[in-house]
Amino acid sequence: MINIRAIDVIRLLIKDKKKICIYSLTLGIIGVILSFGTPKVYKSTVTLAPEESGQGFSANTSSLASMIGINLKIGQTGDAIYPEIYPDLMRSTKFLVDLFPIKVTTQKTHETYSYQDYLQNYQKKAITSYPLEWIKSVMKSFTGDKNEGVSSKPNPYYLNKDEYGIVMAISDKLECSVDKKTNVITITVQDQDPLIAATVADSVQVHLQRAITDYRTKKARADLEYVDQLFVEANKQYTMARRKYSRYYDANSNIILKSVQSEIDNLESDMQLKYNIYTQVAEQRQLAIAKVQERTPAFSIIQGASVPIKHSSRPKVITLAMWMFLGFMLRCAILFWRNRKMFIMF
């Protein structure tokens, strides 16, 4: 049976207070060293609201359903991409690879790099990562693996190790959340440089809007492209018929033969038919352009990207307190284990 009395515990701790202080201070110093050896991180946040496509009773029903976590908007819009899966879209390999060419500028040195070059060559590493990096370099020297590097145009479907590592690094830096009640999208980007964090946050917002717009307007743009082809062909046919009629009429306008007049009438009818087709296709083209505009989603930027002033890393005072508490608990565990017979009664 275990019998622990508070007075016995207090006496044991007072008796061992010197070593408890040593353990706490030692781990506190280790924590501070690790804290100073970890690069500061800055966060930039963008908040935007997508266009609501539902109207009337169905929209109100969807709003009520979203309050209890049920989404009824899929059936209304017919879209396969809706706000709740935007975070999954941002984690896709293609979306992340598209961020590689972004131009970023550091706040201190004002040097400009591509985002992939910056992540691969100019990121500071935490002091705790050096042992792992050393082990990897030793393993590469034995296995003969070479640094493959990042190609100028990475293929999202076939990445090498270095490209995959950058994709994972970007994925860790991005965070996207969607409020189920309001559909407000919050995008957060963290980086060691505050200016780069804001730049990437703004670029991610633009890329997300572009991806959603491309999807929503894909069918309408395909229809517009087809109608454009019909419009060009109809215009060509009408122009040819008009020129043919004009040439024949100018050459035979003074001839009163029935055959000539009949041919003029036929050419005029053909020109009029081609003109009617041309005007109909022109109307369809205008409707197709309007359809693309109608399908293009609107996003309201609630909060744009801004350069953060303060870092979001854990304060060093809190780190010191946590590690000192860890040292205290470690010493207490050792102390209680060595004196366990005091608390166990048979």
Image: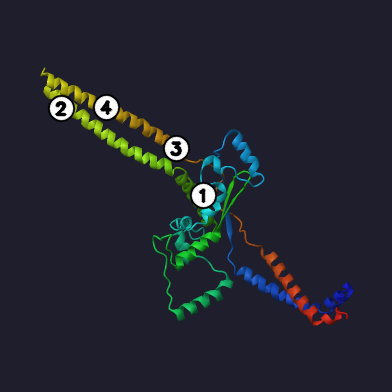
Residue type marked 3: Gln
Q: Residues within 10 Å of mark 2 (few under 14, many from 20)?
A: few
Q: Given the current orientation, which residue lies at the most extreme top position?
A: 256
**Distance CA(mark 4)–CA(mark 2):** 18 Å
Q: Residues within 10 Å of mark 4 (few under 14, many from 20)?
A: few
Q: Name the residue nearer the viewer: 104 or 92.
A: 92
Whether residue 291 appears in this view of the structure is yes
Q: Earlier in the sequence, mark 4 or mark 3?
A: 4
Q: Quadrant of residue 267?
A: top left
Q: Name the residue nearer the viewer: 88 or 270.
A: 270
Q: Earlier in the sequence, mark 4 or mark 2?
A: 2
Give SS at disc 4. helix
Which disc number belongs to residue 273? 4
Q: Indicate which label's residue lies in the foreground, 4 or 1.
A: 4
The residue pinned by badge 3 equals 293
Give SS at disc 3. helix
Q: Earlier in the sequence, mark 4 or mark 1?
A: 1
| Relative horizontal placement of residue 22, taking residue 246 as reference (left or right) | right
